[in-house]
Amino acid sequence: MSEDILASLTEVQRQAASHIDGPLLMIAGPGSGKTRVVTHRIAYMISQGVNPYNILALTFTNKAAQEMRLRIERLVSAPGYWMGTFHGFCARLLRQHGNLVGLAENFTILDSKDSKQALKRAIDTANIQLTHTSADSIAWEISNAKSNLLTPEDYQTSSANSYSALTDVTRKAYPAYKQYLLQSNSVDFDDLLLHVAVMLRDNPELRAQLDDRYRYIMVDEYQDTNLAQYAIVRALCLNNQNLSVTGDPDQSIYAWRGANISNIREFEKDYPHAKVVHLEQNYRSTGKILSTADELIAHNRHRKPKKLFTDNAAGEPVRLVCFGHPNDEAAAIAQRIAAEVKRGERDYKDFAIFFRVNAFSRPLERALRNQTPKIPFQIVRGLEFLKRKEVKDIIAYLHLVNNPANNVAFERIVNMPPRGIGKTTLQHLRNHAERYQLTMLQACREAGMIETLSKRAAAAISRFVTLIDVFTTSVHLPLGDLIIEIVDNCGFTTYLEKIDAKTGEDRSANVDELINEAREFQQHFDEDEAENVDQDDTAITQNQTDLEAFLEQVALVSEVDGLDQDTNKVLMMSLHAAKGLEFPSVFIVGVEHGILPHERSMDDDTSLEEERRLLFVGITRAEQQLQISYSQRRTFRGQTRIASPSQFLYELPRDDMQCTLPAGGLASIGNHPNSDFEPTADYFEHPDQSEHDALATEEIEAKLQQAQSILEQVDDDKSQQRASKIDHLADELASLTNITTASELKATTDSEGSQNNTAKKIALADFKQGMLVAHQRYGSGVIVSISGSGDKRTATIKFLDQQQRKFRLAFAPLMYMDS
């Protein structure tokens, strides 16, 4: 039987799948059959006598876990192993042992929006002033601290030498936030990991018990683990070091949420005797797509070189296309999809469109809708209907019924639907709760004792408490029936009917969908729990109601969990959400300077390499077709600005690609932002531009003389006026065909047969200290210093606002303004 399980694997895959005892590191390139190896390994271990009860498999999404379970079931029938996400596993442990960190087993998991509300309430309660920072910044700082295993006490110590406004306020807000959450019997996402890591650290007997229980641990996407996840895994395999991790350093793209790529890079230091298997053969992409990805990622210096290869056909060339404006980009993509579907070459579900910024989906949505017939599409942003107000309101009722200490849920629904409990009444309740260390619902039960409350307000509060008590007695009802009980008896049905009548919406349908979701969940609840249950989990299975399990699932839903690839729709998603997916035809849009790589990554090599990995991940999602595109101009906050191609595009093997670019090269400007762009051969032919060039040069010289005279003015009182004139001048220069940006100079200098005489006279090396330049955003300035060479040649420029900024000359939208 065991040989049958391994029969379909390659020799390299067998080496990994047949390894049972001892640490194992699988470096799995994109499309190398990683999931196949992991699932076959679990099945093989069970066939060799390993007790499923001792197997723990951790993934990063519920979707990945479900796919693995289905594959394992096809290979072997052996319930009892535990497979799920890190957060799901930690929630499970806290249901059993949460008392060790101050939690009751019915604790609430707050989503990001609710946790932010909890933070704001904690800040208000502690009278913390946010003079020089914001709640969002504090939330980010606390999240980062938790990801790095810093409790409020640890944060006080680690930030002792920091005197920024953010750390000063966070030192006060973090302990207040922790206290508020514990009083509400609630946790945020980061707490799930931090609490378990602390629990394992401070309770050696429990750690040893769990170590003995989970003797074989597998972690998927190990390159994306943070310090807390690393600590949990290390703690669980101190005695039994049968730890298997799978990942690819070249696909580490989550540093912004705490992921530490060194976890996988230093695995062999942590486990010197680990077996290492490299899965480098790609079974997904064509040869040309794979070589494009391989050449791009080779520019990352901090990586172990590896050569991806495939036996697949070379396939058609990767397309690199320049568009005048995102509207043109979207229209061309929609037309191409419609044409291929009409010819019967593909279905809509074969196409995916990726972007770095979610806002880039807007023109694409319009373009897909404008096709005749309309192109069906789905935007992957999690289960959107769970984020709708009316749905979150009902879920808040469920939370309060399940966990009466949940102050966040209480504040959301105490006056929803409106029942005469206003802001003043709520503040009186908060004051009473704070004075006597009560939850908000407990304070409501003492409404008659609060002298500042009017009789009318106290009566309204009393009716609300009675309502919650009635719902609590109905908690034994089937989950769908409980929701119906709440909706009908709290007045929500009537409230929504009135709202729908006024707005023409159908919010009631969303509540109906929630009821359907709840009923479907309950149907699978008992059988799913029975498959995963074992003697150590009996207590939690018996005590955790379907309500608790449902609320936990809703809280832990990930961005791709709502993805249904079986429906015939074009999928649109961020590059981060695309991780782990694959599609026959992929479009990557908006590959522009400041977008990909993101502007926040420009001055940091580590961040820049992660941005390059992000594009690498996007490219390697494509199986047969890939188009990468950028726009010459992009509208941002109502203003249309020049957009520069991403520096990553210069790193692609353009000689082997099908490039549809303007005549002047990759960075040329020539198309009007409002034109209906059609990437035809005629558009990209090299026209006779000699007359136009002469005119443009004459106009540029006139503008430069004008700029020189403006800059020579010494009246400081008019500096703002001069800056405005220079900005206007920069816009005028940008409208000319021969705009002289540094990136264009490089492109036109390298371009054979270029007719741009102005560009020929200047190379990157000709930018000198003291030279006058203009930037499309910051206006005019003077180069005060230059360092580096080639693409890394960097200029420090002092602008009229007296600020100094650094730019890489090869890619910055700088205009040379000296004669």
Image (cartoon, rainbow, N blue to C red):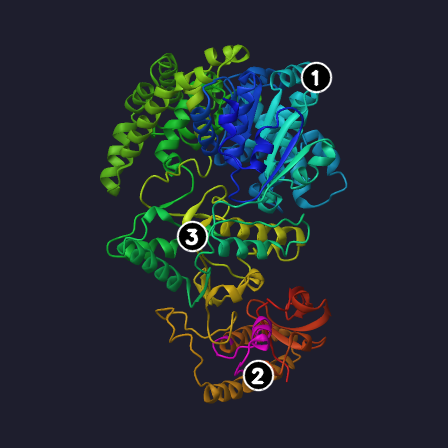
Residue 53 sits above or below residue 810 on the image: above
Q: Position of residue 477 (x, y in %)?
A: 34, 14
Q: Are marks 3 and 1 in contact (CB under 8 Å)?
A: no
Along the line of sight, the residue nearer the viewer: 338 or 485? 338
Residue tagged 1: 204
Q: Are marks 3 and 2 in contact (CB under 8 Å)?
A: no
Indicate whether residue 742 is drawn in magenta: yes
**Mark nearer the viewer, 3 or 2:** 3
**Mark nearer the viewer, 3 or 1:** 3
Labels 3 and 2: the sequence-earlier one: 3
Dot 2 crowding, Cα within 10 Å, few <14, some 14–19, many 20+: some
Q: Position of residue 100 (x, y in %)?
A: 63, 16
Residue 82 sits above or below residue 309 on the image: above
C-alpha gap between disc 1 and disc 2: 73 Å
Q: Report the span colored magenta.
A: 734-756
Q: Secondary structure at mark 3?
A: strand
Q: Secondary structure at mark 1?
A: helix
Indicate whether residue 658 is drawn in magenta: no
Residue tagged 2: 758
Three-letter residue code for mark 2: Thr
Residue tagged 3: 624
C-alpha gap between disc 3 and disc 2: 41 Å
C-alpha gap between disc 3 and disc 1: 52 Å
| Residue that extends furthest to the left in the rendered view of this protein | 501
| Left/right of residue 322 with respect to residue 565 in the rendered view | right
- Number of the label disc, if any, that sits on residue 496: none
| Left/right of residue 466 with respect to residue 538 in the rendered view | left
Residue 49 sits above or below residue 153 on the image: above
| Left/right of residue 709 with respect to residue 444 in the rendered view | right
